[in-house]
Image: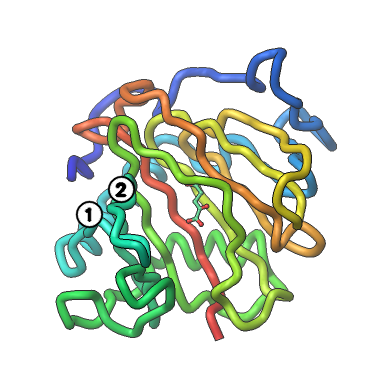
């Protein structure tokens, strides 16, 4: 899986807003915060040493709950690999999409790393405690189509997302399918917050710049989302 942190490097090359043909994210408040159709992006929240420590935590999670390739209900293998920590993990197979209290192999999900709980506390101080820490690994060519996060019960609770490793082109639409979208290159250490009117925004990853970061030993990107499930 290549989750070993590497020495040196910034965890991602500098990448600004995406090219002219795409609708740009609006820069707000300071040069470090962007707004994409209501989804707030905070740049470079985690520095390199915090990123490396977190990669080690996630490696420990993946040793207990190995990454797997979920399949869609129609049997198609998703390009991202997934695992999870917390009370629930998100799984997808012939029975559909859902949260499950156990890894597909039958074991319990490991606890959510403390550094991620601290991040949740910092960005979502009024929310309930997260019950799922979904971990996606994007290898070369992996992507995630536009979708809403709506398998949770309470949409008043936010979803907090952290990027580690290679740059990723994040696309965000509105709360109905087919509307205008805005895109932004996420870098290692960036945080995105889906909350309030943007909690149900369509979002996805068009592509990653494979090898743009040396944070992970075999390149690629990790995305971590913290969610309240029930
Ligand atoms: O990889 C990302 O940044 C987005 C992940 C995502 O949309 C999801 O897990 O639902």
135 shown above or below 90: above
> 73 or 137, which is in the foreground?
73
Asked whether residue 95 is in view, the answer is yes
The residue positioned 58% from the left and 54% from the top of the image is 147
Q: Quadrant of residue 197?
A: bottom right
Name the residue carrying label 1.
59
Q: Secondary structure at mark 1?
A: helix
Alpha carbon distance from label 1 to label 2 = 6 Å
The residue positioned 36% from the left and 81% from the top of the image is 100
Q: Position of residue 111 (x, y in %)?
A: 33, 75
Is disc 1 surrounded by few (<14), some (14 to 19) or many (20+) residues within 10 Å?
some
Asked whether residue 57 is in view, the answer is no
Q: Position of residue 107 (x, y in %)?
A: 18, 81
Q: Secondary structure at mark 2?
A: helix
Is disc 2 surrounded by few (<14), some (14 to 19) or many (20+) residues within 10 Å?
many
Q: Are marks 1 and 2 in contact (CB under 8 Å)?
A: yes
Q: Position of residue 126 (x, y in %)?
A: 72, 75
Q: Quadrant of residue 87?
A: bottom left
Label ID, residue 55: 2
């Amino acid at each position: 899986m290549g989750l070993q942190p590497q020495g040196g490097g910034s965890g991602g090359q500098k990448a600004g807003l995406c090219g002219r043909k795409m609708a740009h994210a609006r820069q707000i408040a300071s040069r470090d915060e962007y707004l994409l159709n209501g989804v707030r992006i905070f740049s470079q929240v985690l520095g390199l040493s915090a990123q490396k420590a977190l990669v080690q935590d996630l490696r420990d999670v993946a040793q207990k709950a190995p990454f797997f390739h979920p399949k869609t209900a129609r049997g198609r293998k998703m390009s991202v690999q997934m695992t999870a920590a917390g009370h629930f993990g998100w799984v997808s197979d012939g029975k559909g999409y859902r949260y499950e209290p156990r890894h597909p192999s039958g074991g319990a999900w490991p606890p959510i790393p403390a550094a991620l709980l601290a991040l949740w506390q910092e960005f979502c101080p009024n929310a309930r405690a997260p019950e799922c820490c979904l971990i996606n690994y994007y290898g070369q060519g992996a992507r995630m189509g536009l979708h809403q996060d709506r398998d949770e019960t309470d949409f008043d609770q936010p979803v907090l997302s952290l990027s580690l490793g290679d740059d990723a082109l994040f696309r965000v639409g509105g709360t109905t399918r087919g509307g205008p979208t805005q895109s932004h290159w996420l870098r290692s250490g960036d945080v995105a917050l889906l909350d309030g009117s943007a909690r149900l925004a369509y979002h996805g990853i068009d592509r990653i710049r494979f090898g743009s970061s040396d944070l992970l030993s075999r390149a690629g990107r990790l995305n971590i989302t913290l969610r309240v499930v029930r």
